[in-house]
Image: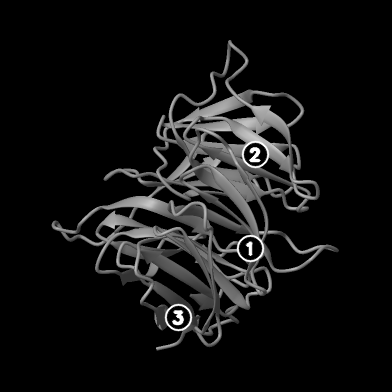
Amino acid sequence: ATTSAPSSGAAVVRRAAPRRKIVVRQTLGEIGSEVFCVRFSPDGQYLAVGSGDGTVRIYIVQTGRLVHTMTDVSSSFPVSTIRWRPPGDRVKNVIVTGNAEGVVQHWHATQGKSLFRFVEEDNQILALDYRPDGTRFGTVGKDRKVRIYDDATKTHIQTLFGGDGTVTAGHSNRVFALKFHPTNPNCLITGGWDMTLQVWDLRVDHSVRSIYGPHICGDALDIHEDQILTGSWRTQDALQLWDFGSGRLLENIAWSRESIVNTDPCLLYAAQFSRDPQAEFILAGGSGANQARLFERSTFQVVDMVTLPKAVFCADFSVDGTSFAVAGADQSVRICEIKTGK
């Protein structure tokens, strides 16, 4: 609510903040397999969708039209992660995907063709991310190692593994999330099954700090300025904010503030800040309640929610923060808008 400045003897006028709600604008169905990852293009025109049958689909966001279906003829394992290469001076509309057989592949999304492919032997790629400048990308997965690649040459240039032997130990189980720091090009954070976040520095080959607590089972790790957002696959304290500098827990964000005894908990697979400069919203979703909920970051209040027939596995905000996509076990993708008004 907003308050006008009172003059002498004048009443204070309070204007209620306009109510915001989620409107499902489009449902992209007939995918035929569970959806494990969704990602908007940097310009917001396209949505890339990765599914359990090993297929990558590219949709036009405005119309929902499917423009390309891309499949690796040598591997039909599930596509577990997708990222668009950050915009720059190079070819636009390039995505990189990782799958459960260790295949990392670059695709030209708007031409529908494979550009480059390699395999991490004896690994399952569970997450990847680009450095904000687009010159490097990293992968993580089953073998707990962080591999860094040069995007121009597609060469493997560095492996980060373990700890320093005294303060940090690295990961002890599968790693499901990786996120480069938005402003520090040498820093990235990972999280997974072992209840830790590991902070890595590219200037050394091991973890330099760890934060104990989050049990991450999907793309449920994000950073805005010096706040870390985590979504854990558990019934209590699932959505949390951490201070990057100190590793201190800042907030347990309540999934529901309603006094309803039988409200189903939501075990989170996905969590993300909105991508507008202020990161106005937080989006999170998972199984149990099979919901995606939108929160105001300033108050941690629930704005609205979307309930799916089955579990939510993935979610992504558009670049301007006015819409998002959610998908999961029901083999469909919902593109939702955040509307203001009645």
Q: Could you tell me if the residues under marks 3 and 1 are in contact, i.e. CB atoms within 8 Å? A: no
Percent of width and height locating residue 14: 48, 80
Percent of width and height locating residue 310: 26, 63
Percent of width and height locating residue 169: 54, 18
Q: Residue at x 60, y 24 (%)?
A: 161
Label 3, on which residue?
16
Q: Amino acid at mark 3?
A: Ala
- Which class describes the residues within 10 Å of circle 2: few (<14), some (14-19), or many (20+)? many
How was the colour assigned to the protein in this rendering? one colour
Q: For residue 166, which quarter of the picture? A: top right
Label 1, on which residue?
278
Q: For residue 139, which quarter of the picture? A: top right
Q: Secondary structure at mark 2?
A: strand
Label 2, on which residue?
188
Q: Secondary structure at mark 1?
A: loop
Q: Secondary structure at mark 3?
A: loop
Query: Is there any visible trace of residue 284 in the rendered image?
Result: no
CA distance separating discs 2 and 3: 40 Å
- Which class describes the residues within 10 Å of circle 1: few (<14), some (14-19), or many (20+)? few
The answer to whether 85 is drawn above or below residue 204 in the figure is below
> What residue occupies the far left of the structure in this picture?
262
Position of residue 205 in the picture relative to residue 49 (left or right): right
Q: Nearer the viewer, mark 3 or mark 1?
A: 1
